Image (spheres, rainbow, N blue to C red):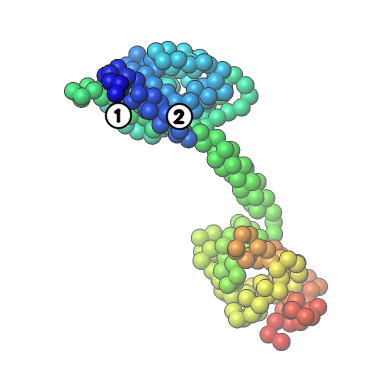
Amino acid sequence: MPTVTKCEETAAGSALLQAVLDAADHAIFSVDRDYCYTSYNARHAADMKEVFGATIALGGSMLNGIGDPDLQARARHSIGRALSGEQFTDEADVRGPGPQSYWFETDISALRNVAGAVIGAAVIVRDVTDQRVAEQALEREASRYRTLLGTTIDGVHVLDAAGRVVEANGAFCRMLGRTPDEVLRLHVTDWDIQFAREDIPNMIAVLLDRSETFATRHRRSDGTEYAAEISATGIRIGDETLLYCVARDISTRRQVRPGVIPRAGTDRAPIGS
């Protein structure tokens, strides 16, 4: 039976460790105190090639692979923290030679020898670019939506299936004489004196996927009332049923029949009929 030498055992162990590293979904690498590679997996090598156009090698400088002086300084600072004994999570946006930006989340920790001395740093890098791009797109949409709500003179408010306020713009809050925080705690029957609470679920169910305009009366926080015209549309967002409403003060004009909304199987019928 052939004898396995110590060198062969070490080589086999190193090959196994490299296979484990290469099987990881995230980029993994380690450097010594001079910021030179002591290990890395295939994902990290591929990321360095894609982002920086760099071909890396064991013993080579990780900082030289980055190239950009500002990014080098940031990497030196982060890894320097680990070389001083810290363990932490960081995130950085990175722009390579091309126009694309990348976002990376990194777990960085000190590597110690058997005596406890710090001999390098270990880094796990997760590419969170898709997640951050999606978040930025959502924030742009939310900002656009908030801008539209904030600039319209109409009182926009959104109700859930039970008639509770889930969102309202400043104009609607001013119409009721209430603060935004107060409005978000209200039920539609707290200001609408014409519709009964038990009628609200039927109204929202009937208005799903269609729009209707009707007149009603609203009560302000000081007890005064005014005539209001409501344009309402029922919508579904995921599993949630909502009623999107636009309110207008029509105290000086009454051209819409009061208290009239659609009911299933009819064109129009007054609520409570």
Q: Amino acid at mark 1?
A: Glu
Residue 209 falls left or right of residue 12:
right
- Image quarter in which the C terminus is found: bottom right
**Residue 204 found in image quarter:** bottom right
Secondary structure of the residue carrying numbered label 2? helix
Q: Which mark is residue 22?
A: 2
Percent across and percent down for residue 135 are 56, 42
Q: Amino acid at mark 2?
A: Asp
Percent across and percent down for residue 144 are 65, 46
Looking at this view, name the residue that lies furthest to the bottom.
273
Is residue 259 or residue 222 the one in the foreground?
259
- Mark 2 or mark 1: which comes first in sequence? 2
How many neighbours does mark 2 have within 10 angstroms: few (below 14), some (14-19), or many (20 or more)? Answer: some
Give the vertical position of 162 relative to 46 (above or below).
Answer: below
Give the vertical position of 189 relative to 117 (above or below).
Answer: below
- Image quarter in which the N terminus is found: top left
Residue receiving disc 1 = 86
